[in-house]
Image: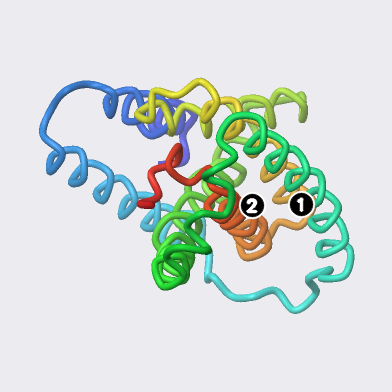
Amino acid sequence: MQSVTYKLTEFFLIFIILPVSFILNYPFLVKALLAVSGFVYVVYILVKVEGNEFKVAPNLRWKSFCTGVFVKFIIIAVLTIAYMLLTAKSDLFHVLYQKPKLWVIILFAYAMFSVYPQELIYRTLYFQRYASFFKSKSLFVFINASVFSMAHLFYRNPLVLLMTFLGGILFAMTYDRTKSTLLVSIEHAIYGFWLFTVGMGHMLGFPD
């Protein structure tokens, strides 16, 4: 499981074949089974092969992390509010105002069942298994953002692909700097929460 051939095959199946297959027309239950099976495999690799213990590191740099996320969040908030005002003013913050209970439920479910699994796959697994294949850190981050964007192909929305590509760059840079699945998951969740709150959640599959 540590050979170059095995890892390349693994990469191709997890990050290329599986996401692309989800845009094809076959039963949802089959897609769900493939997704769950793939995630179980990832957890197995991380625990049994890579030796992860999923403990919170005691030396996390919370101050610098929070400062960086705050600055990026302000920029994202300004851009997304402007986008909503220009394209769908009536939807701005509509879920928060009209369905606050749904808003709370979705935020919790999103963090637990979407964000953390994605970060285990696209940051933790990716960085631990495939870093040795790249001499260029910039290329390594670019490929990470690209495959993260590909994971959202089934939305069939160019704006979603662009946003997830840019998000992938931010998350890859955070993980590369902190080596923390927890911190990058928090950052991912904050931006996702905001998109749902500001009124762009329908593009990312949030019920509204």
Q: Name the amino acid type tagged 1.
A: Phe
The image shows residue 181 at horizontal and vertical percentages of: 61, 60
| Disc 2 crowd, CA 10 A, few/some/many (<14, 14-19, 20+) | some
Q: From the viewer's perspective, is 186 left or right of 94?
A: right
Name the quadrant of the N terminus. Answer: top left
Residue at 77% x, 24% y is 136
Q: Secondary structure at mark 2?
A: helix
- Height in image: 29 above or below 102? above
The image shows residue 93 at horizontal and vertical percentages of: 57, 54
Q: Name the amino acid type tagged 2.
A: Tyr
C-alpha span from label 1 to label 2: 7 Å
Residue hosting label 1: 73
Question: Which of 144 and 169 lies nearest the eye of the viewer?
Answer: 169
| Disc 1 crowd, CA 10 A, few/some/many (<14, 14-19, 20+) | some
Residue 144, image quadrant: top right
Residue 202, image quadrant: top left
- Marks 1 & 2, CB-CB < 8 Å contact: yes
Q: Give residue 191's mark.
A: 2
Residue 184, image quadrant: bottom right
Question: Which of 7 and 13 lies nearest the eye of the viewer?
Answer: 13
The image shows residue 25 at horizontal and vertical percentages of: 16, 23
